[in-house]
Image (cartoon, rainbow, N blue to C red):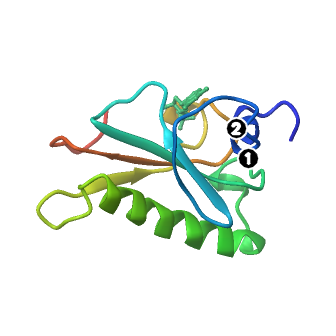
Amino acid sequence: MDDCLFCGIVARKVPATIVHETERTVAFRDINPVAPVHVLVVPRAHVTNAATVGPEHAEDLAEMVVAARQVAEAEGIGTEARGYRLVFNVGRDSANSVPHLHLHVIGGRQMSWPPG
Ligand code: DGP
């Protein structure tokens, strides 16, 4: 999608620190990290958000979750002793700001629940 920020990162037109890639996904560091590890996993194909996901996106979604685990392992937080949080934001109440599906991989510090 021409005017989509994360499509621009996938296409290497917008700079980002890419840390992991698979056939269907790209993972890069969040520009405004909320924790020592904060990586976004996105599908290469444009999908607006989790509320627009359908059965046709099943392979993208599965590969995103696998990629998130691989990122967590590479960052040293994919262990039972550590751990991480996976987040999809949808809509205004969640503070979703970029309309290209992205899975936040957040970790490297103790987190609380519920989120703020
Ligand atoms: P969300 O609130 O779920 O839509 O999160 C969007 C995230 O995207 C937010 O944590 C900041 C990040 N972000 C926004 N613009 C850029 C950018 O140009 N580059 C990178 N690497 N991250 C970005």
* Quadrant in which the C terminus is drawn: top left
Q: Crowding at label 2, few (<14), some or many (≥20) Cα neighbours within 10 Å?
A: some
Q: Residue at x 76, y 42 (%)?
A: 11
Q: CA distance from mark 2 to mark 1?
A: 5 Å
Residue at disc 2, CB closer than 8 Å to ligand 1: yes
Q: Which mark is residue 99?
A: 2
Residue 108 is situated, as x and y percent measured from the top left of the image, at 22, 44
Residue 31 is situated, as x and y percent measured from the top left of the image, at 49, 26
The amino acid at mark 1 is: Thr
Residue furthest top as drawn: 32
Q: Crowding at label 1, few (<14), some or many (≥20) Cα neighbours within 10 Å?
A: some
Seen from the viewer's position, the closer of residues 11 and 58 is: 11
Figure check: 74 above or below 113: below
Q: Residue at x 22, y 58 (%)?
A: 83
Image quadrant assignment for residue 58: bottom right
Q: Contact, CB < 8 Å: mark 2 with mark 1?
A: yes
User: What is the total number of numbered labels drawn onto the structure image?
Assistant: 2
Residue 105 is situated, as x and y percent measured from the top left of the image, at 40, 49
Seen from the viewer's position, the closer of residues 39 and 89 is: 39
Residue 89 is situated, as x and y percent measured from the top left of the image, at 53, 43
Figure check: 92 above or below 50: above
Q: Secondary structure at mark 1?
A: loop
**Residue under pointer 1:** 48
Q: Residue at x 34, y 30 (%)?
A: 34
Q: Which mark is residue 25?
A: none
The amino acid at mark 2 is: Pro
Image quadrant assignment for residue 70: bottom left
Dot placed on the residue nearer the N-terminal end, 2 or 1: 1
